[in-house]
Image (cartoon, grey):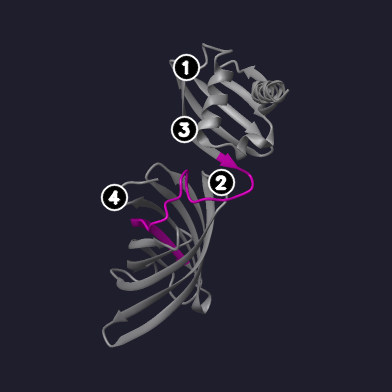
Amino acid sequence: MKSLLLVICLLCVGTALAVEPAQIITSYKVSPSGVLLLTAATEYFSLKTAEKKSAVERAAAKAPSASVVSVAAAGEGELWSVTAGSATALDAWSDRGMRFGPRSRKAGRWFGYVGGQLTRGGDLPSNAWTGRLGTTLFKNRYDAAISLTRNSFTEIEDSGVTTVGLTFRALYPYTEHAGFNLGVQLDRVSTTGYSHLSPSALAGINIYLPGGSFDITFTQGERGNRGLLLGYTVYIGGGK
């Protein structure tokens, strides 16, 4: 009797495992470009990586011509590559969270930046170029940099002032392709017989690109100075 009960239990477990893939993957569709589009139950994202891989491979077997598989459910998704029946994870996304680029690294990343700036308002409108060297901090939630700026005043010929500053920003990635930032900058303006510390508030948009980002920054300084800064950030030492 005990042996019979054991066999029945094993059969029940086997049946449950057999139907689980069908419950996890709820629909199949091949796009016109040949991508296999899978809709999954939310339980899919609680599976271990090996279990996800197995589920994707079973689903991909129904569309042998598809080499790329997209799995989506409830605002989350994954992209897989399938070669000779073996699946490899490529990327993942979620509407529930924000991250710095495609894959956020825990360690800080060094970066260099170069850009051009227009400053209007205040006493002396100017054009400038700016360079920065800095690093991201606290799992890429912030960054800090030393800046060097060369200003040329538009209303004074052959004029120029070099400033050295510190920049600190809080980073708010919105998607893997774009985000925004808020920060402050403190510049030391020094000319013959004159030295002054000039604070500014920063707000900007970051468009993430492979190896860096294109940055649009608005500045608000003292005495009504308002600026627009366009530049490019490149990460030093690789990484996304």
Q: Is residue 140 above or below residue 192?
A: above
Residue 114 point in image, percent of width and height: 34, 56
Q: CA distance from mark 1 to mark 3?
A: 15 Å
Mark toward the viewer: 1 or 2: 1
What amino acid is found at the position of numbered circle 2 in the picture? Thr
Q: Please tell me in which quadrant of the rendered image residue 13 appears.
A: top right
Give the mark nearer the N terminus: 1 vs 2: 1
What amino acid is found at the position of numbered circle 3 in the picture? Leu
Mark 4 secondary-structure assignment: loop
What amino acid is found at the position of numbered circle 4 in the picture? Gly
Q: Is residue 171 above or below residue 191?
A: above
Give the mark nearer the N terminus: 1 vs 3: 1
Residue 79 point in image, percent of width and height: 53, 30
* Magenta residue span: 93-119
Which quadrant does the C terminus fall into?
top left
User: Which residue lies at the image location 64% right of the left edge and 18% below the top edge?
Assistant: 29
Circles 2 and 3, Cβ within 8 Å, touching? The answer is: no
Mark 1 secondary-structure assignment: loop
Mark 2 surroundings within 10 Å by alpha-carbon count, few (fewer than 14), some (14 through 19), many (20 or more): some
> Which residue lies under the disc numbered 1?
85
Q: Please tell me in which quadrant of the rendered image residue 27 appears.
A: top right
Left or right of 197, for residue 21: right
Mark 3 secondary-structure assignment: strand
> Which residue lies under the disc numbered 3?
90
Residue farthest bottom in this picture: 193
Give residue 175's mark.
Answer: 2
User: Which residue lies at the image location 43% right of the left edge and 43% below the top edge?
Assistant: 209
Does any portion of residue 129 appear in the rendered image?
A: no
**Is 116 in the magenta?**
yes
Give residue 237's mark.
Answer: 4
Q: CA distance from mark 2 to mark 3?
A: 17 Å
Give the mark nearer the N terminus: 4 vs 1: 1
